[in-house]
Image (cartoon, rainbow, N blue to C red):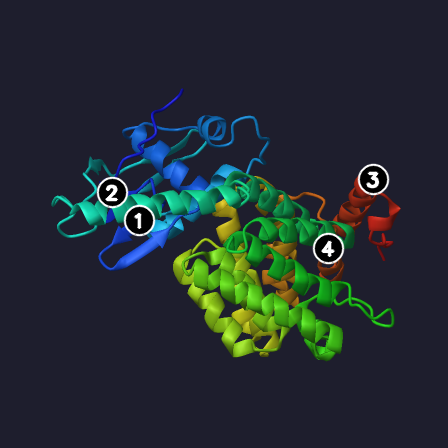
Amino acid sequence: MKKRAISTPFKLGYWTVFPDTGRITRGEETIVLEPKVMGLLELLAGADGAVLSRTDIESQLWANVFVGEDTVARTVSRLRRALGDSAQNPSYIETLPKRGYRLIVPIEPIEEKTATTGAHKPKPRFAMALAAYLAIAALAIYLLIPAPQSNSEAESLTARANDLYMQFTRSNNEAAIALYEKVLAMDKDYAPAQAGLANALVQRVIRWPASQDLEGAGSLGEALERDMHESEPATKILSRATALAERAVRLAPRDADALKALGFAYTAQNRIDEAEAIYERALSVDEDTWEVMINLSEIHTIKGEAAESITMLEQAFDTMARVYHQEPQRVGPWQAAVGALVGKKKEEAGAPQEAEIWYRRTLEISPFEPEATKRLAALLRQAGDVAQANRLCTTLQEKLGADAACPVSVAP
């Protein structure tokens, strides 16, 4: 159902919204929203409290453009961050599972005040003539400048680059870098592309190092142990990644993705305390940023804080379960792996019963997750339940093939 977007200034709770400039203000605080984020706010405001489905929003903000299932959810998340809202205890935007989103605060239309005092006074003829001359000169200069690419194209390319980056293969990471670079060539101040490029450059350093003699690392902790960040090529790449992320944060200080990218870059440079502070700041902006929780878990591991590392992973797993319906494509590939990792860390901490609970919890959401299956089978054998362990391993081999199988034991 098509809704009328609000395009004139209005009050929304403590915020004043200026759709024409993309700004929202609260006291002395001013935030500039990305075009699609402001577009979403205009649509919600125009719906007068009615529910807008994901299809409604997609058809009006991304007409004739294919977007992933998570695109709307991410845009809603960005709007919530800007407003200081929470998905669990919303003050502005309510999520209705399988239905859509709606504003729960009524809007108040306002008239935008003229910025200059005395602007309505008659102007002297000389001043009017000068203003006309300057306007003509400005128009002449403008006509000589090539028209910039639209923000819509920047957003579309960045979303595609983000999807490529999340595949975590070398070819997709390089493709993502190329797209981020293309966006920044169009708009050097586009914070999401700066943050995305920073992430992809860090991944290049730790997973696919420039030196042919080095193998990639499986984690930042491993990369730091091997001093991979100290090579000359790595130093240059990480320096650029950090500069990009820092600029993204300056442009979008309340964007959790930008803050996450900066924490990631700082960690790769072994600036652990600074990274931890940035990650904590990201969580204060958006308490549902489970990716930051995973990264904070790794920070605690690097610092030798095993208990804190496990707690942060548990928090990430629970958060992913809570927001799954909002961004299934983003959460889906990660949640089971996080659950299996919690189980592994519980084993390493000498808590096999807790580890078993976590392996079973993981298999409830991903019945044939290989790591959880194999480790659960090993725990069952240690406890003397060889028959159940064998059933798990046999089923795993039937479903995923011999390469994923765990050994089947003969009962004594």
Find residue 371 and name its label. Answer: 4
Which residue in the protein does label 3 denote?
A: 398
Callouts 1 and 2 close, C-beta under 8 Å: yes
Find residue 24 and name its label. Answer: 1
Kindly indicate the quadrant of the structure image that contains residue 337.
bottom right
Q: Nearer the viewer, mark 1 or mark 4?
A: 1
Q: Nearer the viewer, mark 1 or mark 2?
A: 1
Amino acid type of the residue tagged 2 in the rendering: Leu
Sequence-earlier tag: 4 or 2 = 2
Amino acid type of the residue tagged 4 in the rendering: Glu
Q: Is residue 207 above or below residue 183?
A: below
Q: CA distance from mark 4 to mark 3?
A: 16 Å
Image quarter where the N terminus lies is top left
Q: CA distance from mark 1 to mark 2?
A: 9 Å
The location of residue 326, given as percent across then percent down, is 49, 40
Q: Is residue 7 above or below residue 260?
A: above
Q: Residues within 10 Å of mark 1 (few under 14, many from 20)?
A: many
Sequence-earlier tag: 1 or 2 = 2
Q: Nearer the viewer, residue 88 or 1?
A: 1
Q: Is residue 244 above or below residue 7?
A: below
Which residue in the protein does label 2 denote?
A: 12
